[in-house]
């Protein structure tokens, strides 16, 4: 009986901690825009508006934009681009005023815009 009570308490703590953490991460992610200017002058930006996201890269006068409806969970963002019939999935990890964003094996750290 004691083992089951301990197991129940550990599961409750784990589930409550995960739920709170995931929600907090998503709120933190969506309430701010994130950007970075790279050494070569390229600018990368991620922003949110309701249930939509915009990811842009400006480099050497060229602008690439991925925008559309998005789905966010506690570790990934998926942006749906219906005009291209594509979706783009990014893994993310918030770290205070920084956001580590990973796509296709590459990682960039964006800064929170204030």
Image (spheres, grey):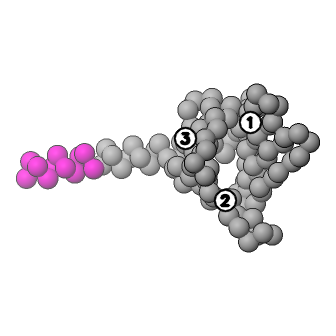
The residue at which mark 1 appears reads as: 35
Asked if the magenta segment contains residue 9, the reply would be: yes
Q: Are marks 3 and 1 in contact (CB under 8 Å)?
A: no
**Tag 3 secondary structure:** strand
Residue at the spot 27% in from the left edge and 50% down from the top edge: 11
> Counting other residues with Cα less than 10 Å from the Cα at mark 3, is it few (<14), some (14-19), or many (20 or more)?
some
- On residue 88, the disc is 2
Which span of residues is magenta-colored?
1-11
Q: Position of residue 3 (x, y in %)?
A: 11, 49
The furthest residue to the left: 1
Of the image marks 3 and 1, the number of the one nearer the N terminus:
1
The residue at which mark 3 appears reads as: 93
* Residue 23 relative to residue 36: left or right: left
Residue at the spot 86% in from the left edge and 48% down from the top edge: 63
Q: Position of residue 2 (x, y in %)?
A: 9, 48
> Counting other residues with Cα less than 10 Å from the Cα at mark 1, is it few (<14), some (14-19), or many (20 or more)?
many
**Tag 2 secondary structure:** strand
Q: Is residue 28 visible?
A: no
């Amino acid at each position: 009986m004691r083992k089951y009570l301990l197991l129940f308490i550990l599961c409750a703590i784990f589930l409550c901690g995960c739920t709170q953490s995931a929600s907090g991460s998503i709120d933190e992610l969506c309430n701010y825009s994130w950007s970075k200017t790279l050494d070569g002058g390229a600018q990368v930006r991620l922003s949110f508006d309701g249930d939509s996201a915009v990811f842009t890269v400006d480099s050497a006068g060229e602008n690439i934009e991925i925008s559309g409806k998005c789905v966010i969970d506690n570790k990934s963002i998926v942006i749906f681009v219906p005009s291209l019939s594509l979706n783009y999935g990014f893994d993310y990890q918030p770290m205070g005023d920084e956001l580590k964003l990973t796509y296709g094996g590459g990682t960039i750290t964006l800064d929170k815009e204030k």
